[in-house]
Image (tube, rainbow, N blue to C red):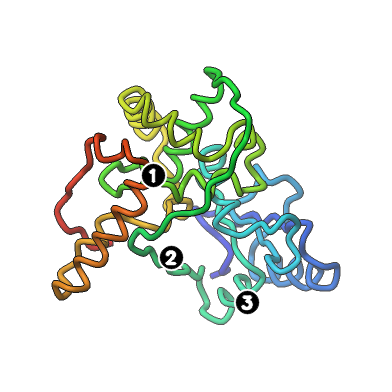
Amino acid sequence: MPIFEGDGRPLAFHLDASIRKGARQKLAADIKEHGGTVVERLNDADFSIVDEQHSRGGRTLLSLGQAYGLTFPNLRFRGLNFVQACIRQGAIFTPVVIRKAMGGVPPREQRGRREFTPRDDEHLAEYLATVVPDPASGGRTGNAIYSKLCSNPEIPWAGNHPWESWRTRYKNKRQWFDSKVADIVRARPANPEALHVQDRRLNRRPYNDAYHLREEEEERTDEEADPQASLSPSFRPSPVLL
């Protein structure tokens, strides 16, 4: 049975512009030899192969997944070694995404104030539905996801405001955003590979007391850097193994 086949059809691969000519030719030949097909348009692909070392603007597989996760929920971004890994395994290789507990505070930037528009709110809701679809995982009131939003070169609208302003916007309209995100997730489940890599629930695994207290302190550092953060409600879910 061909390796690159799913649901009775060839799997489609998009080869990103970051891939050099020689590697591109080899990848295309290997994909076709094992049942797949190569397409020109990203929206026609099941997988997009990216050379992270030569990718413009510091793009990573994660940043690409978060940028396109809502628009193309079934698209998967993979590195150069993915095709060969599948061939060696004789099946589609599924990489393991390691998620971790929440950490520290990124540096703040100073910019001029700019008013938010309804389209800004729609963009932010779509982004939150992509990276933090489950509020129990935490992070929506923290700093990290907004800092990463503004540093992602694949999300041009993020530059409309500094990351602090996006975070404040969510906090000020939290009820509206949470409701909007829930509607988006119900209509279109999130791509698991685009999720924020930090999860509050991992801070509550049954480690020794000293480690547990240190993890909770790191989480508070992330979510309570703003003096007003302590006034916002927080989620306290039961331990969950991911």
Apparent side of residue 40 relative to residue 79 in the rendered image (left or right): right
Mark 2 to mark 1 CA distance (whole Å): 15 Å
Q: Is residue 66 above or below residue 232?
A: below
First of labels 2, 1 by sequence position:
2
In which quadrant is the N terminus drawn? bottom right
Kindly identify the amino acid type of the residue bearing the numbered disc 3. Gln
First of labels 2, 3 by sequence position:
3
Mark 3 to mark 1 CA distance (whole Å): 32 Å
Q: Residue at x 53, y 40 (%)?
A: 163
Say which mark, if any, is on residue 97. Answer: 2
Q: Position of residue 103 (x, y in %)?
A: 38, 60
Is residue 68 visible to us here? Answer: no
Q: Which residue is mark 3?
A: 84
Q: Position of residue 62 (x, y in %)?
A: 54, 57
Kindly identify the amino acid type of the residue bearing the numbered disc 1. Val
Apparent side of residue 238 relative to residue 167 in the rendered image (left or right): left
First of labels 3, 1 by sequence position:
3
Graded by Cα atoms within 10 Å as few (under 14), some (14 to 19) or many (20 or more), the crowding at tag 1 reads many
Is residue 210 visible to us here? Answer: yes
Circle nearer the viewer, 2 or 3: 2
Circle nearer the viewer, 3 or 1: 1
Q: How many marks?
A: 3
Q: Secondary structure at mark 1?
A: loop
Where on the picture, by quarter, is residue 180? Answer: top left
Closer to us: 12 or 85: 85
Q: Which residue is mark 1?
A: 132
In which quadrant is the C terminus drawn? bottom left
Where on the picture, by quarter, is residue 20? Answer: bottom right
Judged from this view, the residue extending furthest toward the top is 118
Mark 2 to mark 3 CA distance (whole Å): 19 Å
Closer to us: 75 or 171: 171
